[in-house]
Image (tube, rainbow, N blue to C red):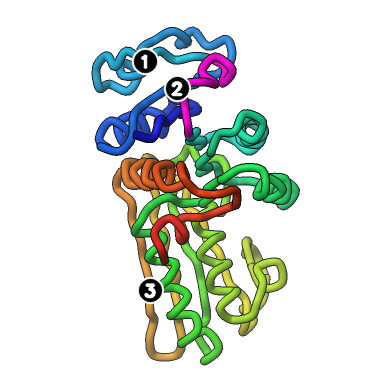
Amino acid sequence: MTRIAIVGVAGRMGRTLVNAVQQDAGATLAGGIVEPGSSLAGADIGELAGVGRLGVTAVDSLEAIVDDFDVLIDFTSPQVTLANLAFCAKHGKRIVIGTTGLSDEELAALDAYRDRLPLVFAPNMSVGVNLTLKLLETAARALGDEGYDIEVIEAHHRHKVDSPSGTALKMGEVVAESLGRTLKEHGVFAREGQCGPRTDKEIGFATVRAGDIVGEHTVMFATEGERIEITHKASSRMTFAKGAVRAARWVADRPNGRYDMQDVLGL
């Protein structure tokens, strides 16, 4: 049994992760972390998640449960994630990271841990999304340099703080790499006013933030006379949570290295 601890256990994703661990026969919930000084410290994690008492109480520091878990799951913020990554490296733990919105500098800092511990980092833990990435790679190679314009459209709930989403950026990166391009050179993230016609090689992004949309992503390949759209829609955070728990079980016996969901799924 893989002993899993969850950071941000009182949040929306944290509560969903508690449910996912409880549903997984190969994992057990070993702990949950809330913000330092939170009044929820000491509460039963199962009650926070709405699944009934589990006999595991929330704590406000990793130090309090350092001997209790094997793998940490972190869907928080860049600064918190990097601090937790350093803690796991110091104490011989594994970590699964679903945090998005990391800057280039923060991504470089994360990557520097690849030789110090086993970690899985992916902007989206959904099995369906990661299969979609493989489909996009195939489509881009077949269509992208044959006069097809490429646009990435994503939609999320009104509370999401980063834009475009990490998943949208990953989709754009997969398409760009398949075509020998880079998002730094060819990504277009805003259009307003008299911006002129699109260029042949640009990869455009459009973002929607509204209501309680869990996550929707479409990559469009459009040319004269036809349009191909590859779309993934998530209707529940459980799809991300189950993927994260699957990644936690997978990374529990892996050597040091930085992995992603393509590795976890054997894609």
**Image vertical order of residue 66 relative to residue 42, above or below:** below
Which mark is drawn over residue 202? none
Instruction: Rate crowding at label 1 as few (under 14), some (14 to 19) or many (20 or more) other CA atoms within 10 Å.
Output: some
Q: Which residues are magenta?
A: 60-70
Instruction: Rate crowding at label 2 as few (under 14), some (14 to 19) or many (20 or more) other CA atoms within 10 Å.
Output: many
Count of numbered circles in the view: 3
Inter-mark Cα distance, 2 to 1: 8 Å
**Circle 2 SS class:** strand
Residue 263: x and y in percent read 47, 59
According to the image, label 2 marks what residue?
A: 32
The amino acid beneath tag 2 is: Gly
The amino acid beneath tag 1 is: Val
Q: Nearer the viewer, residue 72 or 35?
A: 72
Residue 64: x and y in percent read 54, 14
Dot 2 or dot 1, earlier in sequence: 2
**Image vertical order of residue 133 relative to residue 85, above or below:** below
Horizontal side of residue 31 vs 191, given as left or right: left
Q: Nearer the viewer, residue 97 or 173?
A: 97
Instruction: Indicate the quadrant where residue 62 lies.
Output: top right
Q: Are marks 2 and 1 in contact (CB under 8 Å)?
A: yes
Dot 2 or dot 3, earlier in sequence: 2
Q: Quadrant of the C terminus?
A: bottom left
According to the image, label 1 marks what residue?
A: 56
Residue 231: x and y in percent read 36, 65
Dot 3 or dot 1, earlier in sequence: 1
Horizontal side of residue 168 vs 181, given as left or right: left
Inter-mark Cα distance, 2 to 3: 40 Å
Q: Residue at x 44, y 15 (%)?
A: 58
Residue 177: x and y in percent read 60, 74
According to the image, label 3 marks what residue?
A: 229
Q: Is residue 131 magenta?
A: no
**Image vertical order of residue 227 relative to residue 169, above or below:** below
